Amino acid sequence: MSGTTDKSGKYLTFALGKEEYGVQILKVREIIGFMDITPVPRTPAYVKGVINLRGQVIPVIDLRAKFGMPSRERTEETCIVVAEIHQAGRKVSTGVIVDRVSEVLNIKPDQIEDAPAFDSSVRTDFILGMGKIGAHVKILLDLDKVLSTADVIAIAGLEKTAAAA
Amino acid sequence: MPSLSDLTEQLAAAVVVADKADLVTLAAVFDHLGSITQAAGEMKGNPGADRIQQLAGGTATLVQRILLNEVADADASLREVSRSATELQQMVEQALAGRSIPEPAMRDLFVPARESSVAAPPKGDPLGGEAPCNPEDRSLVLDFIAEATAHIESAETQLLKLEDEPDNLEIVNGIFRSFHTIKGVAGFLNLAQIGRLAHAAESLLDRAREGKLEIADRALDLVLESVDAMKRLLGMLSEAMKANVAMSVWPPLAGLIDRMHQFLSGASTAATPAAPAATVAAPAVPEFMKLAGGDQTVKVAIDRLDALITHVGELVIAQSMVAQDVTDMRRDNPRLAGNMAHLSKIARELQELSMSMRMVPIAGVFQKMARLVRDVSRKAGKEVELVLTGKETELDRNVVDAIGDPLVHMIRNACDHGIETPEARVKSGKPRQGRIELKASHQSSNIVIEICDDGKGLDTDRILKKAVAAGVVSADQAMSEQDIFKLIFAPGLSTAESVSDISGRGVGMDVVKKNIESLRGRVEITSTKGAGSCFTIRLPLTLAVIDGLVVRVGDQRYVVPLLSIEQSIRPAAEQLSTVNGRGEMCMVRGMCLPIFRLHNLFGVGAAEQDPTRAIVVIVQDNDRRCCLLVDELLGQEQVVIKSLGDGMEKIAGIHGGAILGDGQVSLILDVAGVMDLAAAGHKVAA
């Protein structure tokens, strides 16, 4: 059963470790190099802190931590992707730390498959679909859903399972 | 300014060609009459001047009525105007030649003209298509709504003053002018219903101006009713403008207008006509089509003003970032140093100016309370006097908007629950009339608003009983008097005997507290049973900026609000002591204060652990004091408060974010929150 909404279009792809992900380019406001982040106490571990984006203070999420992956030292390639997400009916700018930004890909409908079905304990509503580009599989994320929950999402291993499917 | 004779000539010329349907020429006639009135007013010492003024002013009013279609016979009225024009010419000749002017002729001219227009039903379709929709007209209507609202509010204030001084003709005149102006511009814009209402009120006031009627009791109520009705009409018009539709159906209001006419006809036979007060100046220069030109102000759209202020804030930040970057270069380059200093000075002044643009006097909010007290006390059968002090105190515009509701709640409570009935007061030896004092003042970068009444005060036993019954506290909890007072802010608590539509539903005070806290303010209560209560609201002067001390803890920087800081010291070993091996204390000025380690509270690594090598900042919140352990004091800065974004708004101990001079975000401490956190023993692993 393929989804009724058209998920094709341009995606910004990036990597967290060995896994590749994609987010709709329309949601990306800008990409900035890594900068000093002011930590905010008493926030979940995946909330790295806040930064000053041209006078506006925006929160920054460590996507690795959000996905339950071990943290990693930052490198020259580490970036902050500033995305505009919908939260509580408003548009909010949020930064997301990624290991490496790859490229903007135009993903066609026939290249997108639904998220694989796991047992009910695993949430998959945050996955728009699995994009198959050549031999690689990129997990297409619905950022609104990723950032709307307070829990850590167990995403490790999803890509391998999808590739095997 | 053309001479009086020139003016009367121009007037005569205009009148000759005037036609009852020719609005443009009639308006010109009106303007000329206005100029004549003004010019005559400037002819001091000439006895004829008064009569010229009166004739010109009265004729102007007649012309207005012709314009509004409110005369029974427009042609006949125009003929009268023509007669006036001729007579004015003659009068001016006589006056300039030093001869006196016969008086009786004038009076005959006037009385019928006025009476006939009051009794006759207005012509024209009352529901005719009104409210223009094309852009220029729209902006005219919007301007009118703003002006009329200002006039109506002023009229209301004056009416309440009039209650205490019913024979103060100056006040009556002021109110008359307000309705007069509204009527004039409403007529120009074809807003007939508004014009009719203003006209009815104006007639009542006109009668009072002549000394034939006192605006008190019934008359006062009628005028107040028309104030309310006018507010409603303006509100509806405003909504229609916003929704971009034409107002085709106006509320009838015939009832109110009829009652006013009836009152007038009833009163005119009853009252004995007194001589019209000669000291009262002739009707002020008709402000028809002239929008308020009082003090020098301009109107600016609010979002433009806000945008300007935001940008000024960013300019200041950008400027201080540059200043930091060129710090080293400045040493070698005196010209650069000079320019930077100049730039900083300009930026600072810009910021102060922009902040002051948001400041408005609290008078507006206070005036609303006067009306509220009158209505509420009447409904509750109490007699209350409201004393306002410090109306000129200025606050940030946003704060003024937000403080209205809490004040309304508290004043309602004071009238309803605080002040006793006149009988009860007399029995306990108090004056019959209760007294509520509303006072605003500045106190060290805060604004303090006090609401004090001399009523029966808070009854701690009753409050406690209700709280226990409502399950808010347990019966055996130890509570100080202040604790019990604070209970009235608990949701669902109300000690009112009966629930009236005024108050008593127990929803009021907790909302009040929330509103005030969202403005970063606090409420304090003092009360003596039998004598009265006092609620004191403390608010920061502006919501957007805070004076702070930047401190370093480990590799992080925090801003501590300057207001909360009492002093900072490097403690000597002898001042330090521990309690139970866990709680640390520092002896300062004879006080033993607990030390809270910020690096523990916030999980900051690499911080100085030894207090004798660090700095201790002594802070206070209400009556609590403590010492905050920091590594270093970095300097004082006035920072713009930036919200941390959704999801991070309610972090305990953190008030918000601030962008420091080097562009980095730093967190602003909420001293009360920090103390709560520390007291609860929270620690965060580094």
Image (cartoon, rainbow, N blue to C red):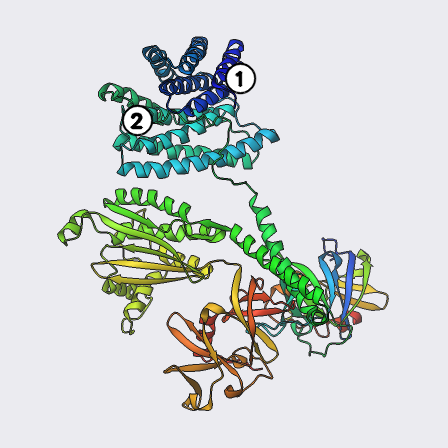
What residue is rendered at 43% in x and 25% in y?
Answer: B42
Q: Is residue B363 left or right of residue B543?
A: left
Mark number, residue A131:
none
Q: Chain of mark 1?
A: B
Q: Is residue B651 left or right of residue B93?
A: right
Give the secondary structure at mark 1: helix
**For residue B516, above or below residue B40:** below
Dot 2: what SS? helix
Q: Is residue B503 visible?
A: no
Q: Identify the subunit bearing mark 2.
A: B
Marking on residue B208: 2
Q: Residue at x 26, y 29 (%)?
A: B214
Question: CA gap, disc 1 to disc 2?
Answer: 30 Å
Q: Horizontal and vertical percent for residue A26?
A: 73, 56
- The residue carrying pointer 1 sits among few (fewer than 14), some (14 to 19) or many (20 or more) residues within 10 Å by Cα, namely some
**Position of the C terminus of chain B by quadrant:** bottom right
Counting from the top left corner in percent of width and height, residue B454 is at: 24, 55
Residue at image coords 82%, 58% = A106
Residue A16 place in picture, x, y as percent: 74, 72
Tell me how many marks there are: 2
Q: Nearer the viewer, residue B648 or B516?
A: B516
List x then y, in percent, for residue B336: 71, 65
> Do circles 1 and 2 both sit on a common chain?
yes
Q: Quadrant of residue B168?
A: top left
Find disc 1 in the rendering and name its residue.
B23
